[in-house]
Image (cartoon, rainbow, N blue to C red):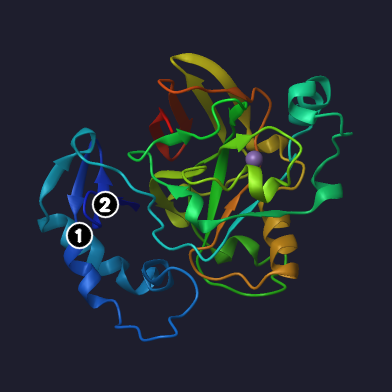
Amino acid sequence: MKIARFDDDRLGLVVGDEIAEVTSVLEKLPAVHWPVPRGDLLIRHLAELAPAMRDAAGEGQRLKIGDVHLHSPVANPGKIIAAPVNYLKHQAEARADTEINYGSDVKTIDHYGLFIKASSALAGPGDGVVAWLNDRRIDHEVELCVVIGEGGRNISRDDALAHVAGYTIGLDMSIRGTEDRSYRKSFDTFAVVGPWLVTADEFGDPSEVDFELRVNGEVRQKANTRDLIFDIPKLIVRASNAFTLDPGDIIMTGTPEGVGPVKPGDVMDCEIDGIGAMQVQVRGA
Ligand code: MN
């Protein structure tokens, strides 16, 4: 299934170039009381709701994808975990560009571990990205995103992919500079997630997936997940050794070479095989 959240928190399944509305299924979610369980309520109950979603899609209203405002398919990720320097060619470009490295010796994920982006940075493709701080370089980083389904701690490599609810496209927007990653990469709208969630059963093997990003039609990033330094199972192992993973947690798996600046008015087109495409506008602050 391809699950989209759109307009006024409506839910749908993507069928071709249309969305079949399944919002009525949300009434089956349990009522929650304070303190609410961590993570995303829909993702927590996705496996139980899937049959009802398929049924509802057969009867639901159809809308053209181009006519709706797409939000992040995960509404309430407890945390957004991200992978610093997880492609060697991105390390090489970061080492070569003083506007990226700011005088530091750029190492890889093995050295840095993981970092966290604020969940308030979450945006959908329809929201666009705000270019805060007009005197600073703001880069696009397109990344395959993993959405955790069943949570857990100390997840083994063999079990790792069984904890994935699905996959989506992410933009880890980044202000370049000397500040900590969690600051530079957590401004509002700097975690774009979309255009929809492709469930793991439909997506299949994430280890060899082509993806690309274009800015105003020009290809800037074009890569394949086979070149990840830490592959997806290893990212899940490392993350769960540190953090209890909850349903709806997002792991941004790292960006390949080709990062570069964007400015207000630019249009980013991101595409990942097996997911689809999302278009994201850059707006002024
Ligand atoms: Mn990144």
Q: Nearer the viewer, residue 243 or 197?
A: 243
Q: Please say if 271 is above or below 2.
A: above
Left or right, 82 with reference to 66: right
Q: Please say if 2 is above or below 125.
A: below
Residue at (22% x, 49% y) in the render: 7
Q: Residue furthest right?
A: 105
Left or right, 1 with reference to 103: left
Residue 138, quarter of picture: top right
Q: Which residue is mark 2?
A: 13
Q: Which residue is mark 1?
A: 22
Residue 161 placement (x, y as % from top left): 60, 60
Q: Amino acid at mark 1?
A: Val
Residue 268 placement (x, y as % from top left): 45, 25
Nearest to N terminus: mark 1 or mark 2? 2
Q: Is mark 2 within 8 Å of ligand 1?
A: no
Q: Please say if 184 is above or below 66.
A: below
Q: Is residue 184 visible?
A: yes
Residue at (30% x, 71% y) in the render: 49
Q: Nearer the viewer, residue 103 or 277?
A: 103
Residue at (82% x, 41% y) in the render: 108
Q: Amino acid at mark 2?
A: Leu
Residue 227, quarter of picture: top right
Residue count near mark 1 (Cα–Cα under 10 Å), binned few <14, some 14–19, many ≥20: many
Q: Is residue 83 visible?
A: no
Residue at (18% x, 50% y) in the render: 20
Cα distance, mark 1 to mark 2? 7 Å
**Quadrant location, the C terminus:** top left
